[in-house]
Image (cartoon, helix red, strand yellow):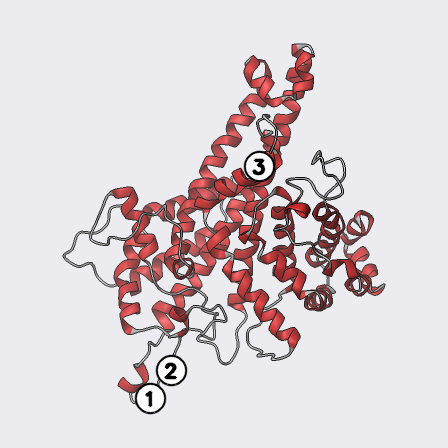
Amino acid sequence: MALLSRLAQTPAGSRELLAANCISYIAQCRFIDLRPDHHDKHTSGLHGNVFDPSGTGFVPSVGDRYRQLLLPLLKLLLTMLTCPGAQRSEVKSQVTSLIGAHSDTFTSILKSHRGPVSVATLEELSLVTGVIGHSGVGQDWSTQDSTALGSGMVHIQRLMLALISHYCNSQMWSGLVAEALRGEAEGTDVNPDPLVTLETKLKVLQICANIVDYCRVAMTMGGKEFSSPYCRIIFSPELMTSLSTNQSRDGPRAFHTSSSSSPLTPSQSQSLGHLIKQLREVSDGYQVTLESSRQIQRKISQPSSLSQDEVLQLVSLAASSLPLSHQQSLARRKLKKMLSLTKKEMDLHAYITENLLYVLWRHLQFYLMHCKPVGWGQRHGKPAKVTAMETTFDLSSLSEGVSPGDLESLKMSIGRCLPSSLFQQLLDVEEGQEAGRRGQVSFIQALVHRIRKLVKLRAAPPTATPALVT
């Protein structure tokens, strides 16, 4: 699989693998459907298993052995899906057929967030969401396929959207990373390696990036029965989640809701308020990561300034007996690896920011310019038309349509939810990513300009009530 993945990295190699029916042969592998139950402690790899009663990990658990087969397969599929070339549509078609043939396995993996979290399950979910997102499974909602294959795709679509509340929520990222690392270090007193911590965090961020990218692509795939000819409406116009975040920062105001640290309900995670809240927190996270990157760079440039404790934290316990110069060399090598991972973390933060901002812009464009609320047709002598998409995600609040009150509330609140300080945070993210290219209009800058224009033209004028300070 490693050899095939290396071949698939080039357009020529990907074409040859496609011509050799590589994906079709992979789809015939029966082991894909033999995924062990991850809730079973005998297969989880956390407490030993029937083949290794001592729990020492000398013999891999059933779950670990299954992933040793599945993960390289998923990496090969993802490599072929992301390789540029004219054959991408055929690759997508064949991968979609593979997912449909083994939909129970993919469904089980997408549900794995309901059970214990480990580094292995995070990597598995990261690859599966990436393969599903790039293959377009369930993204074309214009076709109503009643077959068993179509039903499986719709179920996968629902599960992908259900992950929004769990992984597109930066307040839960640190908890997911900590839980995964506790599972890895169970039974030992050793602190987590900084590299392992960064790699685990990257897996969580990659899952979030895959889900947001899935929403972006699915949103832009239109159909004649959709609410808008321009985009698919996935998120409701409710903004209270964002307003509650502003209040938690600036003190209680007229709009009182639960604390921003409380878990998001499904309806909140499917609202524009959650998107805005995530934009703010992801841009904050980018700045924290940027500062961490600068600190690592300073340590690399001045290795002699590292204290003995800092060196011991970076090198392994076995290397503590080496001379100090050797320890500093090992510490510098690890710092370089940490710097590389930190840059990848910054790239993922920026990628999530761009996609969230794009999804927000398309939804605001629809709600503020094209949406005709429920009852609009009767008032204008035309048949009634529900303009919010009845999504396959089972949320009644989204399937009932948009009311005039929803749009009015959106226009009244949007100015307070999108203050100038938030736009500046987003532009700072772009500035950090595009430091080497000046004089060009960036993607984030263009989207910020369009959203500002929408808010200025369509937002309701301020009332006598005091505005929220952000």
Residue named by callout 2: 385
Q: Residue furthest left?
A: 464
Q: Residue at x 35, y 60 (%)?
A: 453
The quarter of the picture where residue 447 lies is bottom left
Q: Which residue is mark 1?
A: 382
**Residue under circle 3?**
181
Q: Can you see residue 302? A: no
Residue occupying image coordinates x 59% and y 65% = 156
When the figure is inspected, residue 147 is found, relative to residue 76, above or below; the finding is: below
Q: Can the viewer see residue 407? A: yes
Amino acid type, residue under disc 3 in the picture: Leu
- Amino acid on which the number 1 mark rests in the picture: Lys
Q: Where residue 26 sits: x, y (%)?
A: 79, 61
Kindly report the distance in space between the C-alpha atoms of the residues bearing marks 1 and 3.
59 Å
| Label ID, residue 444 | none
Instruction: Look at the image and tell me in which quarter the C terminus lies.
Output: top left
Within-10-Å neighbours for mark 1: few <14, some 14–19, many 20+: few
Does the residue at mark 2 contact the one at mark 1 (Cβ under 8 Å)? Answer: yes
Q: Look at the numbered disc 3 and give the secondary structure of its residue.
A: helix
Q: Residue at x 29, y 89 (%)?
A: 381
Q: CA distance from mark 3 to mark 2?
A: 51 Å
